[in-house]
């Protein structure tokens, strides 16, 4: 890997012999971030077609991590003690039988959504609809740990020069953002509205749409985040709660509205404004609804304007392949900041306060990352 990457930006070295136990951030009861603590647990052993990854960085997810820890996750049931951490990146430390697509020492990004590979949805390339779908850190132990066990089909070689935190920030949200834009049919020159564009996923979707040549209208409730979103490439940034939001968007788009709108928030009033600025033949995409998800839909308006509402559950192998092609072409995620993995509780509090502009990740590369300050 690139030699200029040092400290927490470096990829973790892998030992000659994999140890029997490892450090992990676990929680044994639901509660505030204080329930997260470092413990010693067994290192998982890679089975057939699996690799062992020495974790370098792991993203902190709003729904997957914060609600899971708090005990308010809308659908998953957890067996405690549990290790969080879905989207991550690291160095291949060992390979199981049958693996020839990855080798010890490879820097990889891990797509943490594991599908069966055999059902009709998987065979048709739509593995996000797999009935047996499992997410690392939710249905299985996750990556707030020194090592993870991953199907080799879920790892992607990371191009030279990317840090583990940057690669982690792309590993899941990247294929999701790509799938959203592909399914909506976004083309260069299109107006694309991204609600909650300062979020980890929103910033990635906005950035990818800009990278693909779309004109992005980003939203955030915070003035400093709106300023930053424009610096990062948005054509305009508005407050979704402002009384002039609808007229501002319509004025900017010459009265036509946006061809594509991304709403991963699921907040009723914001949704109503999204629909009010959606162009004829426009598409709204949702891959999240952490603010409730119960919204009103005016079917008469929808059909008479030939509009579409699309649910995109997550990424899939094809969207991951396309995303990594765009990374090779220069696309990068917005990494807000990192915390050492031992400071996971502080990272959770930081996200709960909506302090982030982009992705927040935990670094786990060095011994220092495992020491509490
Ligand atoms: N389907 C998937 O695979 C997938 C993957 C990743 C994420 N997601 C979904 O994407 C969504 C965002 O997740 P994330 O981890 O990217 O979030 P995040 O980084 O924690 O950001 C959440 C954003 O929500 C906005 N927000 C919070 N409370 C709000 C309110 N009351 N009204 C309006 N906006 C509010 C904040 O925006 P401002 O402070 O800027 O206004 C904040 O930036 C979630 O619904 C999550 O489930 C889905
Ligand atoms: Zn399947």
Image (cartoon, grey):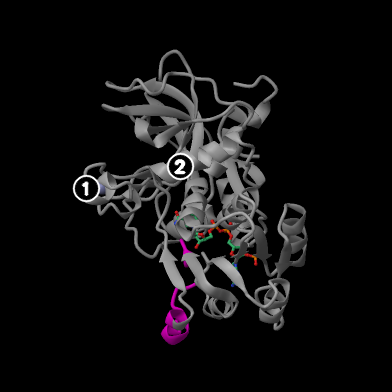
Of the numbered discs 2 and 1, the one sitting upstream in the chain is: 1
The stretch in magenta equals 286-303
Mark number displayed over residue 373: none
The image quadrant of residue 153 is top left
The structure residue drawn at horizontal position 62% and vertical position 41%, both measured from the top left corner, is 331
Q: Quadrant of the N terminus?
A: top right
Q: With respect to residue 99, does 210 lie above or below?
A: below
The structure residue drawn at horizontal position 26% and vertical position 26%, both measured from the top left corner, is 48
The majority secondary structure of the magenta stretch comes to loop
Disc 1: residue Cβ within 8 A of ligand 2's nearest atom = yes
The one nearer the camera, 185 or 106, is 185
The one nearer the camera, 316 or 29, is 316
Q: Number of numbered discs present?
A: 2
Q: Tag 1, which secondary structure?
A: loop
Q: Which residue is mark 2?
A: 320
The one nearer the camera, 220 or 83, is 220
Any part of residue 223 in sight: yes
Q: Which residue is mark 1?
A: 119
Residue 26 % position (x, y) = 44, 45
Residue reaching furthest to the top = 16
Residue 36 % position (x, y) = 49, 49
Residue reaching furthest to the left = 119
Any part of residue 19 in sight: no
- The residue carrying pointer 2 sits among few (fewer than 14), some (14 to 19) or many (20 or more) residues within 10 Å by Cα, namely many
Q: Is residue 300 magenta?
A: yes
């Amino acid at each position: 890997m690139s030699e200029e990457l040092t400290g927490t930006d470096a990829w973790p070295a892998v030992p000659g012999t994999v140890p029997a136990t490892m450090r992990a951030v676990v929680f044994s009861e639901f509660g505030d971030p204080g329930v997260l603590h470092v413990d010693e647990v067994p290192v998982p052993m890679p089975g057939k077609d699996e690799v062992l990854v020495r974790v370098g960085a792991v993203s902190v997810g709003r729904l997957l991590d914060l609600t899971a820890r708090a005990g308010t996750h809308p659908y998953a049931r957890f067996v405690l003690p549990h290790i969080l951490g879905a989207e991550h990146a690291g160095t291949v430390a060992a390979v199981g039988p049958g693996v020839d697509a990855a080798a010890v020492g490879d820097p990889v990004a891990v797509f943490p959504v594991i599908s069966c590979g055999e059902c009709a949805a998987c065979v048709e390339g739509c593995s996000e609809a797999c009935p047996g779908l499992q997410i690392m850190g939710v249905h299985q132990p996750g990556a707030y740990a020194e090592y993870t066990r991953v199907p080799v089909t879920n790892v992607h070689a990371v191009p030279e020069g990317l840090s583990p935190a940057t690669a982690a920030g792309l590993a899941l949200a990247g294929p999701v953002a790509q799938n959203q834009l592909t399914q909506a049919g976004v083309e260069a020159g299109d107006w694309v509205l991204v609600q909650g564009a300062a979020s980890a996923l929103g910033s990635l979707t906005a950035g990818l749409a800009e990278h693909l040549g779309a004109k992005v209208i980003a939203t955030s409730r915070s003035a400093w985040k709106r300023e930053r979103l424009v610096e990062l490439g948005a054509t305009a940034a508005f407050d979704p709660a402002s009384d002039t939001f609808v007229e501002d968007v319509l004025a900017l788009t010459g009265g036509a509205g946006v061809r594509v709108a991304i709403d991963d928030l699921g907040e009723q009033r914001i949704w109503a404004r999204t629909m009010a600025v959606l162009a004829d033949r426009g598409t709204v995409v949702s891959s999240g609804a952490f603010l409730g998800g119960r919204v009103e839909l005016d079917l008469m308006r929808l059909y008479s304007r030939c509009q579409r509402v699309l649910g995109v559950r997550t990424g899939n192998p094809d969207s991951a392949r396309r995303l990594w092609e765009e990374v090779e072409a220069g696309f990068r995620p917005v990494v807000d900041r990192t915390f050492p993995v031992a400071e996971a509780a502080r990272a959770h509090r930081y996200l709960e306060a909506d302090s982030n502009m982009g992705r927040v990740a935990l670094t786990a590369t060095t011994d220092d990352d495992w020491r509490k300050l």
